[in-house]
Image (spheres, rainbow, N blue to C red):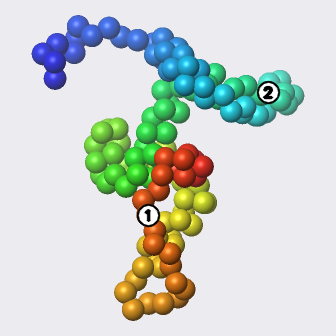
Amino acid sequence: MLGIPLSTLPKLSSQKLNDPIKDCCEEAEVNTRVHYVNYSGGKAREHSEPKWKLMTTHTTRKTFITNSIVLGMNTKTIRDITGHKKDSVFNKYVKISEEFKKLEMDRTWDNIPGHQIKKAPDIKPLTHSQINECL
């Protein structure tokens, strides 16, 4: 793309790539506490950390895919961007909340011409805050 041969680009380990992601998320104040259980030696240990500490290339890729779908991007385009060849692998990255599913069902099925299941309000595109609430 930029005329730089790929062979000259530096190779980064996952950790070297994850560190700047964590830094950006910390600066963006992605501070929601995440509670999880880790099992080691047959014992459960509870942990609680700010979300930015848990961010990785995997979580950002999953977020990109989910947000792109929520915003209406064609899934074939998303798959081309992310390099997913199989639906089964791609679908593992998609996490749509129940709230968003309900909004989509209402937006789609309440607007069928001549079909008056119930009076649907004028449905406007989702705001960024509504999308964030759904994720």
User: Mark 1 or 2, which is nearer the eye?
Assistant: 1
- Residue 59 located left or right of residue 80: right
Query: In the figure, residue 54 lies in which quadrant?
Result: top right
Q: Which residue does the numbered mark 1 point to in the structure image?
A: 124
Q: Is residue 36 above or below residue 134?
A: above
Q: Counting residues from the N terminus, which is met first, the one under dot 1 or under dot 2?
A: 2
Residue 114 against residue 134 in the figure, above or below:
below
- Of residues 21 and 78, the one nearer the viewer is 21
Residue 122 x %, y %? 45, 72
In the displayed orientation, state which residue is furthest to the right.
Answer: 43
Q: Residue at x 33, y 45 (%)?
A: 78
Q: Which mark is residue 46?
A: none
In the picture, measured across the screen, residue 31 lies left or right of residue 80, that is right
> Can residue 23 be seen in the rendering of this structure?
yes
Q: Residue at 44%, 90% (x, y): give it.
A: 115
Residue at the spot of label 2: 47
Q: Is residue 52 above or below residue 19?
A: below
In this rendering, would 35 be left or right of 109? right
Q: Amino acid at mark 2?
A: His
Image x and y of residue 100, in percent: 55, 59
Mark 1 element type: loop
Mark 1 neighbour density, 10 Å: few (under 14) some (14–19) many (20 or more): few
Q: Position of residue 116 (x, y in %)?
A: 48, 90
Q: Residue at x 47, y 56 (%)?
A: 126
Check the image and report above or below for 15 versus 133. above
* Disc 1 to disc 2, C-alpha distance: 40 Å
Label 2 element class: strand
Closest to the observer, 20 or 87: 20
Q: Is residue 42 visible?
A: no
